[in-house]
Image (cartoon, rainbow, N blue to C red):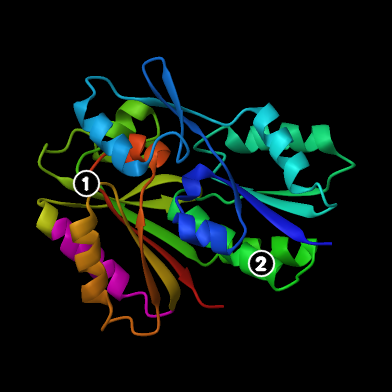
Amino acid sequence: MTVRIVTDSTCDLPAALVEAHGITVVPLTVFFGDDALLDGVEISAAEFYERLRASSTLPRTSQPSVELFRETYKRVSADGDEIVSIHLSSKLSGTLNAASVAREEVAPEIHVDLIDSYQVSLGLGLIVREAARAAQAGASLAEVAATARRAMDRVSVHVSVDTLEYLQKGGRIGRARSFLGSVLSIKPILKVENGEVAPLERVRTRSKANERMFEIASSMARAKEMFIAHSANEVEARAMIERLRPRLPHTDLILAEIGPVVGVYAGPGALGIAALERE
């Protein structure tokens, strides 16, 4: 009996890694007015940021339906496989709740171990990837779930954003609200802490924000792997990776793009670091 990994599209894992690890991704939805688009299925990151810049109103997002989760669990377990389903922080979305209702509806025929990652974007992606590696190595359901939960304690996420406008309007600003009311020119550096967005530092310019992000990443010598993620900001993300290579020679540095749903709140021009420490 195989253990299968299910997650949601806010994991922002590159498609090649999703395919290589046999991960099933349930998409959230982005709305531009009445136009509903499945994240990563009906709209790509590049298309999203182009449309975001042209839109006069902020798009909104919606969690997957219970029905979509139920259908996914049934399809994935068609051969009797068990499932570990890992999702973005319950403090940021109702996605986990929808998955929980679906799990109850398919039980006891299908065994689903549901995990709140208390992370989002590539922080979630790192946890999902660790679990998928364990599943591919033949680990049991309990072992895969334990692997994911251990990874949760070793993941850190930092992001610099051009503006807090998107987080504020989207209602996901969390404790970073303390940065509101500062001078308009600041570039906030945020972190994910206890499942929500928290303030870390304020710097005055984009170049200083990038330099501070480089310092943060450089200090993570114990990182096994690290995603450098961007929102319509690939040049700066690639430059960051090249600068980090000599500083972190034993860390797998991976370029990634912040997807449409997370991009609604991060906005264009964000630069993120998601790192997983070695055990």
In the image, residue 55 sits, relative to residue 94, either above or below, namely above
* Apparent side of residue 150 relative to residue 163 in the rendered image (left or right): right
Furthest-top residue in view? 34
Q: Nearer the viewer, residue 41 or 154?
A: 41
Q: How crowded is mark 1: few (under 14 residues within 10 Å), some or many (20 or more)?
A: some
* Apparent side of residue 14 relative to residue 55 in the rendered image (left or right): right
Q: Nearer the viewer, residue 236 or 158?
A: 236
Residue 150 visible in the displayed image: no
Of discs 2 and 1, which sits in the foreground?
Answer: 1
Q: Where is residue 115 in the image (x, y as percent from the top left)?
A: 66, 50
**Kind of residue sitting beneath label 1:** Gly
Residue appearing at x 77%, y 38% in the figure: 103
Q: Which of 121 and 135 is in front in this view?
A: 135
Residue 216 visible in the displayed image: yes
**Kind of residue sitting beneath label 2:** Thr
Residue appearing at x 81%, y 32% in the figure: 105
For disc 1, the marked residue is: 269
In magenta, the rendered stretch is 208-222
Identify the element where label 1 is drawn.
loop
Gap between marks 2 and 1, in whole Å?
33 Å
In the image, residue 141 sits, relative to residue 79, either above or below, namely below
Q: Residues within 10 Å of mark 2 (few under 14, many from 20)?
A: many
For disc 2, the marked residue is: 147
Residue appearing at x 37%, y 80% in the figure: 221
Q: Where is residue 200 in the image (x, y as percent from the top left)?
A: 30, 53
Residue 110: which numbered mark, if any? none
**Would you identify the image quadrant in which residue 19 lies?**
bottom right
Q: Where is residue 225 in the image (x, y as percent from the top left)?
A: 44, 72
Q: Which of 154 and 194 is in front in this view?
A: 154
